[in-house]
Image: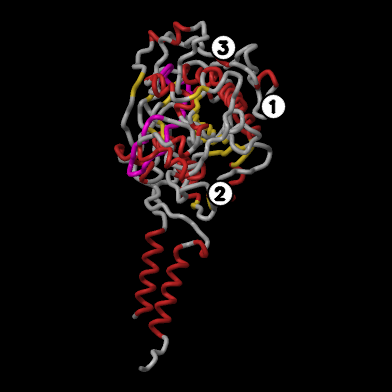
């Protein structure tokens, strides 16, 4: 009888822990004109660290344009707050590395007070970049759209946030592991496989080294979908890029923008990517989502909210580039890494990957699908040399540039003629559409020695010893 009870309990546990997957395997059509989603991912900056004084540029001759650029919620809204931080000097593209990690970031956050940064991440956290370093990235935001309420998915480092970026959940709370790992069918890659939607991952070099592959069990079977940046450019140029692409800056020689390295190399790498995308045959049906993985310990003023039961992390830069993206637009919609997954699910009419993805907002307010704008070329003449490939070295003149002269650009359409509001938000989730949920129970995978089952076995063994050993007679 005891054995039967133990067997039934074990069987129920296995059934509960297995991910529940449902849905068709036929390839759905797109709900919008978007046929290609390209995701570009950097490291370690907050919104205020990058856009704290956007669009202020006192040295520019384009003050009439700047006066009409949409203003996000940033440091310019609070002069005393701005004065408590330090701008990075022109010609400098890095700071000492702030202290990073789960503990440091929670001290920074201080339960939403946002006043523990010098204690948690240290003095380097209280710095911000200006147009002198970020003129070209500010141009992207001006010519297309930015979100000023896009948050990390958890108050922690790269690994857990990247899992939220790819899977909508994470068994990790900091940068460690594996173990544990997650099965590929719980990621966006597994969902796209199920619905026959092509995908690709693109990483540095001519070797297939994807940092997260060790944490996604089963992805090794899809090695043909993991390729180099040069393959990305080839597929882009000949129009064979898959429907969903992830281009990772990490793993290269200083392209990821993370401290203490120079952010200039990653900035120019991004411009090379955007120029190549806009010159490609797929530009007319593409969206590019650009974001950063975690705050890196830098200051941000906005207390992150709780969304779909999850305490979000610090606010991050988020830029949307597309022929359908609203020019000079600021989205006030609360978004997070998993919102990009929600957009992919929405666009192809497939179920929400999991319950968290079902409950986060979809970034739809960035778009006007009734207007398609022509491609641009981001070229700044003598100010700085924009590369044409993704594997380059900085020149000494580039490394000491003042990029303020690159911002602002002339609008593609006069701001006064734009038929939409300069700011907007939309609270629209997959759960509100009745989309269904693909993975009903997220599970993690661990070897037996690192799993809770080992503890269960030890407890049962102790019970057995106590129960069946002969009792001493008194």
Q: In the figure, residue 111 lies in which quadrant?
A: top left
Q: Quadrant of the C terminus?
A: bottom left
Query: Percent position (x, y) of residue 256?
Result: 58, 33
- Magenta stretch, main secondary structure, is loop
The number of callouts visible is 3
Label 3 sits on residue: 405
Please tell me which residue lies in front, 54 or 437. 54
Q: Measuring 43% from the left and 81% from the top, which residue is drawn there?
A: 465
Crowding near pointer 1: few (<14 within 10 Å), some, many (20+)?
A: few
Decide which of tag 3 and tag 2 comes sooner along the chain. 2
Q: Is residue 38 above or below residue 367?
A: below
Q: Comparing marks 3 and 1, which lies closer to the viewer?
A: 3
Label 2 sits on residue: 219
Is 309 colored magenta in this rendering?
yes
Q: Mark 2: which secondary structure?
A: helix
Query: Percent position (x, y) of residue 2?
Result: 35, 79
Magenta region: 301-330
Q: Is residue 246 above or below residue 172?
A: above
Crowding near pointer 2: few (<14 within 10 Å), some, many (20+)?
A: many
Query: Percent position (x, y) of residue 59?
Result: 52, 9
How far apart are the alpha carbons under marks 3 and 2?
A: 45 Å
Q: Measuring 45% from the left and 51% from the top, which residue is drawn there?
A: 171
Task: Kindly identify which numbered label has been placed on residue 393.
Answer: 1
How far apart are the alpha carbons under marks 3 and 1?
A: 22 Å
Q: In the figure, residue 110 lies in which quadrant?
A: top left
């Amino acid at each position: 009888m005891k054995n039967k009870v133990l067997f039934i309990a074990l069987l129920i546990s296995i059934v509960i822990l297995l991910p529940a997957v449902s849905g068709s395997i036929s390839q759905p059509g797109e709900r919008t004109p978007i046929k290609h989603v390209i995701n570009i991912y950097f490291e370690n900056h907050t919104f205020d660290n990058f856009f704290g004084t956007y669009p202020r540029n006192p040295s520019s001759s384009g003050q009439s344009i700047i006066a009409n650029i949409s203003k996000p919620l940033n440091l310019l809204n609070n002069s005393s707050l701005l004065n408590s931080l330090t701008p990075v000097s022109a010609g400098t593209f890095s700071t000492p590395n702030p202290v990073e990690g789960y503990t440091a970031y929670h001290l920074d956050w201080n339960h939403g007070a946002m006043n523990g940064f010098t204690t948690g991440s240290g003095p380097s956290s209280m710095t911000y970049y200006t147009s002198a370093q970020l003129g070209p990235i500010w141009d992207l935001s001006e010519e297309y759209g930015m979100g000023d309420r896009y948050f990390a998915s958890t108050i922690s480092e790269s690994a857990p946030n990247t899992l939220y970026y790819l899977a909508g959940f994470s068994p990790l709370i900091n940068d460690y592991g594996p173990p544990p790992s997650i099965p590929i069918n719980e990621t966006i890659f597994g969902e796209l496989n199920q619905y026959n939607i092509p995908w690709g991952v693109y990483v540095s070099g001519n070797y297939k080294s994807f940092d997260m592959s060790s944490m996604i069990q089963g992805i090794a079977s899809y090695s043909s979908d993991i390729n180099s940046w040069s393959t990305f450019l080839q597929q882009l140029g000949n129009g064979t890029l898959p429907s969903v692409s992830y281009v990772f800056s990490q793993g290269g020689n200083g392209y990821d923008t993370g401290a203490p390295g120079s952010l200039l190399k990653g900035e120019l790498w991004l411009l090379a990517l955007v120029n190549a995308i806009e010159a490609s045959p797929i530009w007319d049906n593409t969206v590019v989502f650009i974001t950063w993985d975690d705050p890196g310990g830098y200051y941000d003023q906005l207390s992150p909210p709780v969304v779909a039961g999850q305490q979000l992390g610090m606010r991050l830069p988020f830029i949307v580039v597309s022929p359908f993206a609203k020019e000079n637009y600021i989205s006030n919609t609360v978004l997070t890494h998993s919102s990009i997954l929600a957009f992919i699910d929405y666009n192809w009419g497939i179920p929400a990957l999991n319950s968290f993805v079902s409950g986060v907002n979809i970034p739809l307010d960035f778009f006007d699908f009734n207007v398609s704008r022509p491609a641009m070329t981001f070229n700044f003449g003598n100010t700085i040399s924009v590369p044409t490939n993704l594997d380059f070295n900085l020149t000494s003149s580039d490394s000491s540039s003042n990029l303020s002269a690159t911002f602002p650009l002339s609008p593609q359409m006069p701001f006064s003629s734009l038929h939409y509001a300069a700011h907007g938000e939309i609270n629209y989730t997959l759960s509100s559409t009745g989309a269904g949920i693909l993975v009903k129970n997220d599970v993690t995978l661990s070897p037996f020695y690192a799993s809770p089952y080992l503890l269960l076995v030890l407890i049962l063994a102790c019970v057995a010893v106590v129960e069946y050993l002969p009792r001493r007679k008194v």
